[in-house]
Amino acid sequence: MTKTFLFSILSLFVFNGVNAATSWWEQDTVCRINPSTCYTNMGIGYEPAFWDNTSKCWGQKYVCVNALSETYKQAHHPTDERTAMIRTDIKSPNISADFDTTVLNINDNCFGVRKTQGGGSKASVNGRFVRVWCNDILDDLNIDNEELEEGQIISGPDATEPECSVLATHGYVAIENGKCYGRYYDESQYRIQCDGGVATLIVLNGSDGTTGSSDITTMAQANARFTEMLQNARNQHKTYFGE
């Protein structure tokens, strides 16, 4: 009786241990991708089919060509709007300091957008922040530009901002206009005067600043013209100053 009881306890211990070991052995191994080293299954802007030999895992990140440094582009000659890169290559000197490769460019499905300030009214070009001009202004000035979300910028190694006098000839003043720079003033109502690069807006009071007053030959005509200018000035003041 005693031997039978001991054998039963021993059998229970041994076979339960085997079953427990078998159960542990048959469990599926759980592998979790480490997002700090791998780009597998990361979604838009990533290529899971490319091997990252440095991180020893699948997945590379698409970087917008505009975000690449000139040195990198000259060495690799990218032909598309984006290029797949391994994690350890996405850093200086391969990336332009003007771009942030942690932000997705949703238009091109790649990472790399220009760094901005002031809600997008200024953008980084050649290491300094320049004005983002409202749409069509640089086109009117026949200046090559780069399209951004809030407007246009002058890019390139020799990018320089348009001078006050150049803007004035097309009716523009370099003041902030929402999230971009540049406001248009009708030349029949305003004159833009530049002094040391600073624009002064002169209200013409309804008169045509391009013509003289040689058509006025009598005092009555002069009084009528001044009365008309005074009324136009009042209307303009009410329109633009709300008084």
Image: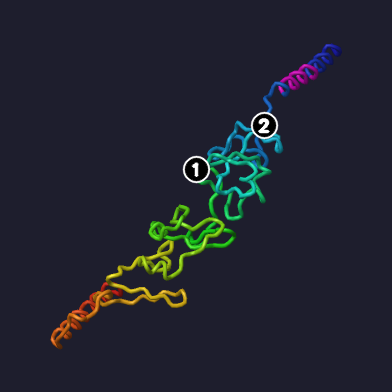
Q: Secondary structure at mark 2?
A: loop
Q: For the view shown, which residue lies furthest in the right direction?
A: 3
Query: Where residue 171 sits in the image (x, y, percent)?
Result: 35, 67
Identify the residue shown where x is 30% and y is 69%: 187
User: Taking the image as drawn, is residue 243 in sight?
Assistant: no
Q: Residue at x 40, y 57 (%)?
A: 139
Q: Is residue 38 magenta?
A: no
State left or right for residue 192 relative to residue 30: left
The correct choice, above or below, for 109 with respect to 209 in the image is above
- The image's mark for residue 108 is 1
State the image coordinates of residue 191 (x, y, percent, origin top left).
33, 74
- Disc 2 residue type? Cys
Name the kind of residue labelled 1 in the image. Answer: Asp
Quadrant containing the C terminus is bottom left
Q: Which residue is mark 2?
A: 31
**Nearest to the observer: residue 221 or residue 84:** 221
- SS type, badge 1: loop
Expressed as whole percent of the image width and height from the top left, the position of residue 208 reads 25, 74
Q: Is residue 21 visible?
A: yes
Q: How is the image coloured?
A: rainbow
Q: Earlier in the sequence, mark 1 or mark 2?
A: 2
Residue 125 higher or lower than 19, as above or below = below
What type of secondary structure mainly makes up the magenta span?
A: helix
Above/below status of 152 relative to 201: above
Question: Is label 1 or label 2 in front?
Answer: 1
Q: Which residues are magenta?
A: 13-23
